[in-house]
Image (cartoon, rainbow, N blue to C red):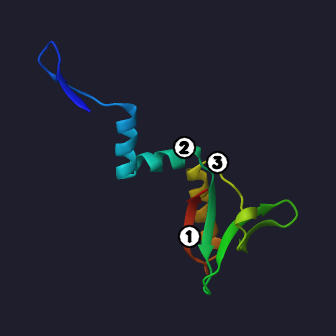
Amino acid sequence: MKLTKTASGQNKLSISRKEWIRIGKKYQWLKKAQTENNSQFVISAQSINGVTKYYCKNATQGEKMIPSALSMAYLFADKEKAQQKMTALQQKYEGLKNWQVQAI
């Protein structure tokens, strides 16, 4: 990182890509941006007994919250669509708690 003066007398900050990435990782904003841009999202919730259930969509059984089924969970490409679906599911499955949209 270097601070230089331009011909007009203003200060200019020069930073390398490596330094920029290091700062981003240190303050965790780079990791969050990369996660949201490159990830798919799943919906999860916990039952009263603490078992995590995942939203699954199947041609034969339809839409269900299935326990411990991360490998079968429906993958959303868009986080906003996943959050909208989660809102609808919360009304249907009132007994579940700790609803989350998780990036995987």
Q: Is residue 80 above or below residue 98?
A: above
The quarter of the picture where the C terminus appears is bottom right
Q: Amino acid at mark 1?
A: Trp
Label at residue 77: 3
Q: Residues within 10 Å of mark 2 (few under 14, many from 20)?
A: few
Pinpoint residue 47: horizontal percent, then vertical percent.
62, 81
Camera-side mark, 2 or 1: 2
Instruction: Tell me the SS state at disc 3.
Output: loop
- Report the residue at 72% width, 58% height from top: 74
Query: Label 2 belongs to which residue?
Result: 37
- Left or right placement of residue 47 versus residue 26 in this view: right
- Of the two numbered discs 2 and 1 on the same chain, state the one appearing first in sequence: 2
- Report the residue at 40% width, 48% height from top: 25
Instruction: Tell me the SS state at disc 2.
Output: helix
- Left or right placement of residue 98 versus residue 63 in this view: left
Q: Are marks 2 and 3 in contact (CB under 8 Å)?
A: no
- Left or right placement of residue 59 versus residue 42 in this view: right
In the figure, residue 66 lies in which quadrant? bottom right
Q: Residues within 10 Å of mark 3 (few under 14, many from 20)?
A: some
Task: State the CA–CA distance, disc 2 to disc 1.
Answer: 22 Å
Pinpoint residue 40: horizontal percent, then vertical percent.
63, 51
Label at residue 55: none
Pinpoint residue 37: horizontal percent, then vertical percent.
54, 43
The quarter of the picture where the N terminus appears is top left
Task: State the CA–CA distance, disc 2 to disc 3.
Answer: 10 Å
Instruction: Tell me the SS state at disc 1.
Output: strand
In the figure, residue 89 lies in which quadrant? bottom right
Query: Label 1 belongs to which residue?
Result: 99
- Of the two numbered discs 3 and 1 on the same chain, state the one appearing first in sequence: 3
